[in-house]
Image: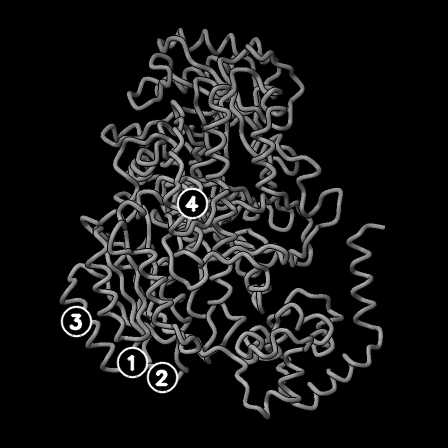
């Protein structure tokens, strides 16, 4: 019998069997009236329905030992920690409090920073998006973010900043306490006119003000971001000394520049804390496991009850990848509870514990100040010789799509209408800096090309839809031909598959049939030659224009057709063409030799998913509760395992020798296939960078001409896109920029 089933049976037996002492404990809790069923229901979301039906019984059997709270105010871990005489006694904290501690006036919660809901003046959250859109001219390499709840600590912080010896952009959020807050805001603005200083409601401790800045995009693009706050911790006799240790551990009066450079030079480090502030023991989960797991699933990470690593104290330096992950959480004011001096189990507590998981997802770690003295030399990164990205032109209206899908249909129609297939599913995916663009405007393509160039992309592999001479989606590229001043490097990929109603090109109602009538090669060469003559058409080897065929084995006689195509381009005066083929996961009836094409293109996730990689819909039951929506019949597989498959020597050995290595930032075709979607779960900027970093280190030697290709630039309905999104901003592009050897102006100037 599987061990997991045995464990579940044993747990059920422990829950159902009478246990006199625990049953007496449950009776005392019911009689006291202090158990908050609604609160406990929120923190125990996802447990067995039987347990949820009897919450007090669950608390006495399991919940208290997990550190869960019976209500919003009583913390079992704090009760033991703040009453030292109880630590070595075999007691159940809440039971002891009900029987003895309440009468003895024992402390049962920590008096953490942050006042009661009525302590602060009411103020609305300021929308900072317009400020972010204007950009910050002359921005520094670093940003320092300060949250002030205790207003008198500003002078202390100002001294620390003046002695740190680094240049930075300053961001200050202030809890709004009537006139005192306004006066301090005005004083800081007068002393630091370039600073962003914002009044905030007393909501979400120091965390919500920080994520509000992140969500607006104000902290994107910095090499590192420092976060500190006016921690006073009244429950600690050393509160001021502790704050001083946390702050000066990050911004010492001597050595900050060297420590900061050491942090940046360590590719394994993603988060830097003062000494002693990296907590690893699972006892610190407290009542936060469920809330943390729910939060992390927004960025496709699962929490593990047996593993915890996080920065205690909520003060740290972050690298940009971690800032991007925080933005991806898309936390807003409504995600944070009203301030009632909660000691555990809130969104702010969960956020603190989630940070370590975000860092680890990219293979990164938390470092403490003293560890930076032993930073290894940074590795020499190898950059690809040429970077391409697949490009979809279906962002404009066509008569055909109006007829097939309804008037006004474009790719945006499908992308924006996507609905969730499971709890915390990041759908719909919506555009960021470029908005809901229309590709019949060549200026949009110029903006895209500028972003791509800054990220190190050399050319777009643009889909070319040609059905025995009939064109569709041709307007963007044809309009570009009339605007020679717009820089848009590209080459064409003939998407030679039939259009079908289920979007997979393999089954379902045929909307537009792909044919191969006699002489199609000459017609295709003639219709593509005009683009190849354009100076913007890519010639990656410096001589030959490049052309790609999406499904070569669908041609009746690929060998003969390729020969005729090459000859036809010669007759058109184009000369020799560098001809490639996509390694599509479903082969046609015809066979092709590996040397028929000059190169092949790897296109994840095609041919990279095996049975062991499935989380939902595979040969084994899902290992975790995904909260699937009723009627879901699709497939969910592990993005991280797909990346491992792509990097394995065994997989690489099966590829033709002249294959361009491919990578995808993510994959989820929910927008096209609804409950039948195929989804790569676990894709985020950290896991994308982890794959890309290893691809450049391990597979470039085998890749054709040392190139890579990304699937894709803008496949929004398949969540395969590099261009900016609302969830992650331009994070995917900056990942590519860090590894592509980009020499164009950085992305900060393109997307801010």
Where residue 637 sits, quadrant-wise, is top right
Q: Which mark is residue 269?
A: 4
| Cβ–Cβ under 8 Å for marks 4 and 1 | no
Q: Nearer the viewer, residue 39 or 568?
A: 39
Mark toward the viewer: 4 or 1: 4
Q: Which mark is residue 187?
A: 3
Distance from the alpha carbon under mark 4 to that under mark 2: 39 Å
Where residue 66 sits, quadrant-wise, is bottom right
**Residue 218: x, y in percent?**
30, 55
Q: Which residue is mark 1?
A: 177
The reply to whether residue 399 is in sight is no
**Residue 162: x, y in percent?**
19, 59
First-in-chain label (2 vs 1): 2
First-in-chain label (3 vs 1): 1
Residue 165 to residue 124: above or below: above
Distance from the alpha carbon under mark 2 to that under mark 1: 7 Å
**Residue at 66% from the left image edge and 90% from the top image edge:** 32
Residue 637 to residue 530: above or below: below
Mark toward the viewer: 3 or 4: 4
SS at mark 3 in the image: helix
Q: Nearer the viewer, residue 294 or 32?
A: 32
SS at mark 1 in the image: loop
SS at mark 4 in the image: strand
């Amino acid at each position: 019998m599987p061990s997991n089933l045995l464990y579940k049976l044993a747990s059920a037996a422990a829950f159902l069997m009478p246990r006199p002492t625990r049953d007496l404990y449950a009776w005392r809790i019911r009689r006291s009236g202090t158990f908050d069923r609604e609160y406990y229901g929120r923190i125990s979301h996802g447990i067995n329905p039987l347990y949820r039906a009897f919450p007090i019984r669950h608390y006495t059997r399991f919940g208290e030992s997990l550190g869960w709270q019976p209500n919003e105010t009583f913390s079992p871990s704090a009760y033991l920690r703040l009453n030292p005489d109880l630590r070595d006694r075999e007691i159940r904290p809440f039971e002891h409090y009900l029987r003895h501690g309440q009468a003895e006036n024992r402390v049962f919660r920590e008096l953490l920073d942050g006042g009661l809901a009525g302590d602060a003046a009411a103020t609305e959250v300021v929308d900072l998006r317009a400020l972010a859109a204007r950009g910050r001219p002359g921005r520094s390499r670093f940003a320092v973010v300060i949250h002030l709840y205790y207003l008198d600590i500003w002078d202390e912080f100002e001294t620390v900043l003046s002695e740190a010896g680094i240049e930075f952009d300053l961001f200050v959020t202030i809890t709004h306490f009537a006139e005192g807050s306004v006066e301090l805001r005005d004083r800081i603005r007068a002393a630091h006119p370039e600073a962003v200083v914002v009044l905030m409601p007393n909501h979400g401790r120091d965390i919500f003000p920080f994520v509000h800045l992140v969500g607006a995009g104000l902290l994107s693009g910095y090499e590192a971001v420092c976060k500190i706050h006016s921690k006073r911790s009244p429950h600690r006799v050393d509160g001021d000394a502790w704050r001083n240790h946390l702050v000066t551990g990050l911004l010492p009066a001597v050595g900050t520049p060297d420590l900061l450079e050491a942090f940046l030079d360590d590719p394994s480090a993603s988060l830097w804390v003062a000494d002693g502030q990296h907590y690893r023991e699972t006892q610190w989960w407290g009542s936060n496991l469920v809330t943390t797991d729910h939060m992390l699933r927004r960025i496709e990470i699962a929490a593990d009850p047996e593993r915890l690593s996080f920065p205690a104290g909520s003060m740290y330096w972050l690298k940009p990848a971690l800032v991007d992950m925080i933005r991806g959480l898309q936390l807003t004011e409504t995600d944070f509870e009203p301030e009632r001096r909660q000691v555990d189990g809130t969104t702010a507590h969960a956020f603190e514990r989630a940070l370590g998981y975000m860092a680890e997802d990219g293979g990164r770690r938390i470092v403490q100040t003293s560890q930076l003295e032993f930073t290894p030399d940074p590795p020499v990164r190898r950059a690809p010789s040429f970077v391409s990205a697949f490009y979809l032109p279906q962002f404009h209206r066509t008569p055909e799509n109006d007829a097939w899908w309804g008037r006004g249909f474009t790719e945006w129609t499908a992308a924006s209408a996507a609905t969730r297939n499971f709890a915390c599913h990041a759908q719909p995916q919506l555009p960021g800096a470029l908005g809901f663009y229309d590709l019949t405007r060549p200026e949009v393509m110029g903006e895209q090309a500028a972003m791509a160039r800054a990220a190190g992309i050399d050319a777009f592999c643009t889909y070319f839809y040609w059905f025995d001479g009939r064109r569709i989606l041709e307007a963007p590229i044809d309009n570009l031909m009339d605007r020679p001043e717009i820089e848009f490097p590209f080459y064409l990929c003939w998407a030679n598959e039939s259009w079908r109603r289920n979007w997979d090109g393999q089954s379902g109602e045929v909307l537009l049939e792909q044919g191969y009538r006699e002489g199609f090669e000459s017609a295709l060469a003639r219709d593509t030659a005009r683009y190849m003559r354009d100076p913007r058409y890519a010639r990656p080897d410096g001589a030959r224009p490049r052309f790609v065929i999406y499904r070569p084995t669908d041609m009746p006689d690929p060998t003969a057709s390729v020969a005729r195509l090459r000859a036809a381009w010669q007759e058109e005066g184009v000369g020799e063409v560098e001809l490639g083929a996509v390694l599509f996961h479903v082969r046609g009836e015809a066979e092709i030799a590996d040397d028929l094409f000059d190169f092949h293109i790897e296109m994840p996730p095609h041919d990279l998913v095996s049975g062991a990689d499935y989380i939902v819909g595979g040969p084994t039951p899902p290992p975790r509760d995904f909260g699937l929506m009723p009627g879901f019949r699709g497939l969910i597989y592990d993005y991280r395992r797909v990346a491992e498959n792509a990097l394995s020597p065994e997989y690489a050995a099966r590829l033709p020798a002249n294959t361009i290595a491919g990578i995808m930032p993510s994959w989820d075709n929910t927008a096209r296939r609804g409950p039948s979607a195929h989804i790569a779960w676990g894709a985020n900027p950290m896991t994308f960078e982890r794959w890309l970093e290893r691809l450049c280190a391990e597979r470039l030697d085998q890749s054709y001409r040392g190139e890579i290709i990304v699937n894709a630039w803008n496949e929004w309905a398949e969540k395969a896109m590099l261009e900016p999104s609302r969830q992650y901003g331009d994070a995917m592009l900056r990942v590519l920029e860090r590894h592509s050897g980009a020499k164009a102006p950085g992305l900060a100037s393109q997307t801010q």
